[in-house]
Image (cartoon, rainbow, N blue to C red):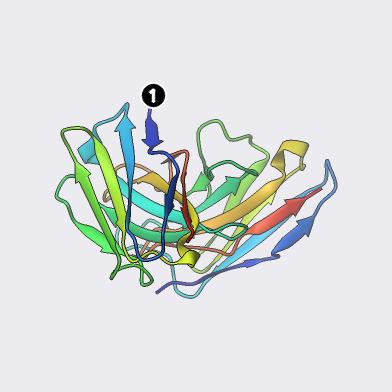
């Protein structure tokens, strides 16, 4: 059974950084990609980026490539999303989601439970 | 970058009646591998998104058969044959044909 379990809620000050984890289980970690998606309060879904755990390839959304780093630890089957220089508008729920690599898997097939990041002074 | 435009943004529906949501892409979503990576997600209040339909018309495991997807190229539709109470939520189309992936704005289904 596939599970993506994310780290707990965070409260950060403006200008700080946050690192959210997403621990995968129930499947071969290197065989599927992982996307990160965020949702500001009352807003829609915003795609942040994608990582291939097999070779570490990453690609980022246009609003994030300067401030986000995606990484994985294949020994613990854990993915990480680090967001730097936080502003108030980064307050959101952050999700990881399992995606395909090439034609293996289905995009958005499994989602983490979400991690609330609150930016407050 | 590909922009997805959903209509309507809000859809009042009657239980037992059909509902339909449209998703239009700014570019063709046909991938070089021949597949079209257009999905539909449902998000109930307070929950993560849930995959309903992938590659235009494939119902994901456990999704009731009252949900169906169709379309091609740049125009896609999600249909619910008979709306039930549990279908209340926000529906998103998502494209994963090209990076950056993108979502439609969401359509709120209200009884």
* Chain label for disc 1: A
Q: Which residue is mark 1?
A: A1
Return the x and y of residue A84 as percentages of the image width and height.
Answer: 31, 62
Q: Residue at the spot x=39%, y=24% of the render?
A: A1
Residue nearest the observer in this picture, A85 or B36: A85
Q: Residues within 10 Å of mark 1 (few under 14, many from 20)?
A: few
- A18 sits left or right of B76 in the view: left
Residue A103 showing in the rendered view: no
Which residue ends up furthest to the front in the rendered image? A121
Mark 1 residue element: loop
Residue nearest the observer in this picture, B18 or A4: A4
- A19 sits left or right of A95 in the view: left
Return the x and y of residue B52 as percentages of the image width and height.
Answer: 55, 43
Return the x and y of residue A4 as percentages of the image width and height.
Answer: 38, 35
Residue nearest the observer in this picture, A83 or A113: A83
Q: Quadrant of the rendered structure where residue B46 is?
A: top right
Q: Residue at the spot x=30%, y=58% of the render?
A: B33
- Residue B42's place in the image compared with B5, above or below, is above
Residue B39 showing in the rendered view: yes
Q: Residue at the spot x=19%, y=56% of the render?
A: A57
Residue nearest the observer in this picture, A18 or A98: A18
Which residue ends up furthest to the top in the rendered image? A1
Q: Residue at the spot x=59%, y=60% of the render?
A: A43
């Amino acid at each position: 059974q596939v599970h993506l379990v994310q780290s707990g809620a965070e409260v950060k000050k403006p200008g700080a950084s946050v690192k959210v984890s997403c621990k995968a289980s129930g499947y071969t970690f290197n065989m599927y990609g992982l996307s990160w998606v965020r949702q500001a309060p009352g807003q829609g879904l915003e795609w942040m980026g994608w990582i291939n755990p097999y070779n570490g390839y990453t690609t980022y959304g246009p609003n994030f490539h300067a401030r986000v780093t995606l990484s994985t630890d294949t020994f613990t089957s854990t993915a990480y999303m680090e967001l730097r220089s936080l502003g108030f508008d980064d307050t959101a729920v952050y999700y990881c989601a399992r995606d395909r690599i090439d034609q293996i898997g289905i995009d958005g097939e499994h989602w983490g439970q979400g991690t609330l990041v609150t930016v407050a002074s | 970058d590909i922009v997805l435009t959903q209509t309507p943004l809000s859809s009042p529906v009657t239980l037992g009646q059909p509902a339909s949501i449209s998703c239009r892409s700014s570019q063709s979503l046909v991938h070089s591998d021949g597949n079209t990576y257009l999905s539909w997600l449902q998000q109930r209040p307070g929950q993560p998104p849930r995959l309903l339909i992938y590659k235009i018309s494939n119902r994901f495991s456990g999704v009731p058969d009252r949900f169906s997807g169709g379309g091609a190229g740049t125009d896609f539709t999600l249909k619910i044959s008979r709306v039930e109470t549990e279908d209340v939520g926000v529906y998103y189309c998502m494209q994963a044909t090209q990076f950056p992936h993108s979502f439609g704005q969401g359509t709120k289904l209200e009884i």
